[in-house]
Image (cartoon, rainbow, N blue to C red):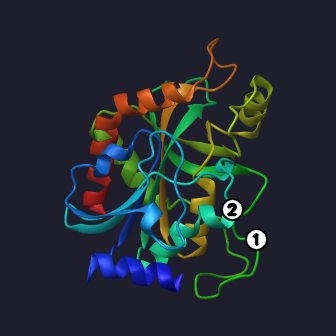
Amino acid sequence: MKETIEFIQKQIKDFQPEIGIILGSGLGDFADNLEGVRIKYSDIPGFETSTVAGHKGQLVFAEVLGKKAVIMQGRYHYYEGYHISRIVYPVKVMKKLGVKILVITNAAGSVNKSYNAGDLMVISDHINLMGVNPLIGENDSTLGDRFPDMSEVYNHQLSKLALEKGKELNLTIRNGVYAAMSGPSYETPAEINMLRIMGADAVGMSTVPEALVANYCGMKVLGISCITNSAAGVHPSRLSHKEVVETAKRVKDGFKKLLTAVIKEM
């Protein structure tokens, strides 16, 4: 960690980010036109390489509407074969750099039958079905408590702000529960039916590990899902990652407007 932080600080000088943003599949364009410092994950000591299509794999340090931010263009996933501790390492790095608010975005499949591809969903809560918890192992007391409370993983005020801004922008915005599965295979129709019975509105293969650790570290978390496809069994069509990325790109303008409006009010 010390080596990671020292390397990054040499690149960004006196820049101290207060907001962290994780951009999911197909949503990386948000940071493309920002002026700032870009550092490839592959160049950072302690970081891994993102291997999924639609993930650029770099940190962007830039000002967004006067707010200093560090943006992950792409993330790691548990299904890529990394240990769960590696998945959340960048979040811990953000904490050490001074980040107080973390915005986590993802591409997700709709479990709720009233949701449509292209909708945006503010995450109210999550269900962890990945079969692993990133806090397992020796606790680092400089980051958080051994047994952190998870009553409000996703900050109520930030979620309310995102919903209000979404409505002002005339976006189709939802408020629902995100279920995380390990992947990389998509879920079966029976599994989706199980998730629906459990109370999930959307399903994906990310976000929950980062949200757990961010909350553990004392950050305020805002989660936003881009509904890119209907989950298995909702509609009679086969699922593909290509469809996920294409849908995310189609709604990226609305997503950018929402994220910009929320950051402005933070």
Q: Position of residue 101 (x, y in %)?
A: 42, 68
Tell whether 223 sits left or right of 99.
right
Three-letter residue code for mark 2: Ile
Q: Is residue 175 above or below residue 104?
A: above
Q: Is residue 116 above or below residue 139?
A: above
Q: Is residue 95 above or below residue 28?
A: below
Residue at 67% across, 72% down = 149
Q: Secondary structure at mark 1?
A: loop
For the residues labelled 2 and 1, say whether their Cβ atoms are less than 8 Å apart: yes
Q: Position of residue 111 (x, y in %)?
A: 64, 30
Label 1 crowd bin: few (<14), some (14–19), many (20+), radius 10 Å: few
* Residue at which label 1 appears: 136
Residue at 48% across, 68% down = 220
Q: Position of residue 23 (x, y in %)?
A: 43, 50
Q: Which mark identifies residue 156?
A: none
Q: Secondary structure at mark 2?
A: helix
Q: Is residue 152 visible?
A: no
Q: Which mark identifies residue 84?
A: 2
* Res. 230 image quadrant: top right
Q: Is residue 215 visible?
A: yes
Residue at 67% across, 82% down = 145
**Among the two numbered marks 2 and 1 on one chain, the one whose residue lies closer to the N terminus:** 2
